[in-house]
Image: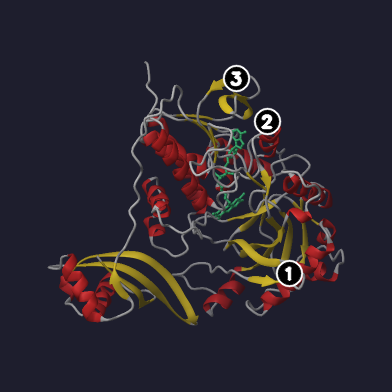
Amino acid sequence: MIRINQLKMPLGHSADSLKARAAKTLRVRENRIADLKIVKRSVDARKKPDICYSYVVDVAVSGLDMAGEQQLVHRLRDRNVGISQEKVYRCPECGGERLDHPPVVVGAGPAGLFCGLLLARKGYRPILLERGQDVDARTREVAAFWEGGTLNPSSNVQFGEGGAGTFSDGKLNTLVKDASGRNREVLRLLVEFGADPSILYLNKPHIGTDVLSQVVKAIRTEILRLGGQVRFMSQVTDVELEEGRLRALMVDGSKRLKAEAAVLAIGHSARDTFEMLCSRGIPMEAKAFAVGLRIQHPQSMINRSQYGQDKVEELGAADYKVTWKAASGRGVYSFCMCPGGYVVDASSEPGRLAVNGMSYHGRAGENANSALIVTVTPEDFPDRTALGGMHFQRQLEERAYALGGGKIPVQLYGDFRENRAGAENFGQVKPQFKGAYAFANLRELWPEELSKALIEGVEAFEGMIRGFSRPDAILAGIESRTSSPVRIPRDEGLESPVRGIYPCGEGAGYAGGITSAAMDGLKTAEEIIRRFAPPVYRG
Ligand code: FAD
């Protein structure tokens, strides 16, 4: 097919007019456009309030074979017109090494689910072990927690079917290059299991917590249909190793599950599991991550800055991305921005508190929120062990819990900047939280240097988004689960030096976000498929 880049179209245009524009660009009659596939659509708001779409499309022209397409492209001499080079995803053929037991996947987040799905489709009948509950029971439990109930350390915003992203905005964009076609395959699978097909071409696709929950359930149903197993409330509490090789997993302290291959897709918050793996000698190292606070502004203010008007119905709530280098050398940047969203209590350990952001598919909430984070490295951690970053997170979360008396500690930006306790009431920005909150001085959370870097960042962001540093913007802490504090090394076959263990996804340090974790799940499944034959089932 012929690829056309940078095809500009006005908002509200029809499918026919897009076809007509493509035909005009290729200088062929419109009735010769046999097929038109949208590859990408982004919003171009550089000349706001005149906003338009910018398309990448693949077009088939009737009567043209590949040589004909090449001739047409050559004749046009237009740098936005070329031959489409789309990479098609291919799963490897099954290998020959014998497996006596089905492969086990630990964790049913995006990495574990996509790994399990591919293994199931290739006939491996995987066993998925998930410490949390199924998504329906989990949703009820999380809602009760946000209403003031007790935290369940096994099933919460971080743990349970769907993993950490289940109660999220469900942003699906990733910075990982798609040389293998895995990114597109993940999006294609999400659509197969219920997501809107527009995620295949939107520049910044998002799914929302409500739709994601349904998709996750549909993937589980497919794994079960193919003979796989998904066991909830099943926590891997130990690993049995012999001569540097996995023999079995211990589940809930007492059940032994033999396995020659286990994928550890445990996410970035499985701290007890990290401790267990470390104590068993699984190689692991501390890694840099980022910590910060979440900030809320009125969504209309963000729309005004990005679109030049309070609301553009067709485009929905606007997003933003801002970065700054503080004088101390630390990078300050926005992270996991949630248009029309809520700030949620995302804690997973009693006595420790962490926040994150979430939106529904419609992104119709009153506020925009985003984490504002600063990078921290092993030099900042309280110890130089592999778990130093995790210990640092725990310290910060304990302080956050204490500051808010168990509730999300919040502060107006103006008070944070002036380092004062403040008036304990909100300004024009109305709070949008899931979970109880209480006023506190967030400057007491962490070293002063981090607060200074953050303030520097917010003041700089005012120059990018008008109103960003308004005194009544609402801050909440602490955003500590931005990525994994550890890396669990693996070789080119994606196996740990302890054979049979396949570290995977965000927790192992190989992904950051829903899509990249799901891609890593596919990649890990491919390695198991390439190496082993599906186990033989007797009855
Ligand atoms: P996880 O999703 O963390 O899944 C790991 C699973 O393993 C968990 O379900 C856990 O219960 C289970 N587990 C852990 N230990 C064990 C054990 N010992 N035994 C059995 N099971 C175990 N990313 C985005 O791309 N877009 C977003 O909009 C977005 N928003 C987010 C909002 C929130 C509130 C949160 C918390 C995260 C958000 N993220 C977002 C990050 C994203 O969710 C993660 O990057 C992604 O889920 C990582 O996938 P994973 O499969 O590697 O790990």
**Mark closest to the chain's N terminus, 3 or 2:** 3
* Quadrant position of ligand 1: top right
Answer yes or no: disc 3 within 8 Å of ligand 1.
Answer: no
List x then y, in percent, for residue 531. Answer: 41, 35
Mark toward the viewer: 3 or 2: 2
| As drawn, 484 above or below 234 | below
Query: Which residue in the protein does label 2 denote?
Result: 280
Query: Which residue in the protein does label 3 denote?
Result: 255
| As drawn, 306 above or below 375 | below
Q: Whole-Å distance between the Cαs marked 1 and 2?
A: 37 Å
Q: Amino acid at mark 2?
A: Arg
Is residue 10 at all visible to an observer of this figure? yes
Answer yes or no: disc 1 within 8 Å of ligand 1.
Answer: no
List x then y, in percent, for residue 193. Answer: 39, 45
- Which residue is drawn at the image coordinates 42% and 41% (left, top)? 526
Q: Whole-Å distance between the Cαs marked 3 and 2?
A: 18 Å
| As drawn, 87 above or below 102 | below
- What label does residue 216 carry, if any? none
Q: Amino acid at mark 1?
A: Gly
- What label does residue 329 carry, if any? 1
Q: Examine the image and state in which quarter residue 424 appears.
A: bottom right
Element carrying mark 2: loop
Is residue 222 at all visible to an observer of this figure? no
Q: Which part of the image, by quadrant, shows the N terminus?
A: bottom left
Task: Describe the colour scheme in one phrase.
Answer: secondary structure
Q: Examine the image and state in which quarter residue 61 appears.
A: bottom left
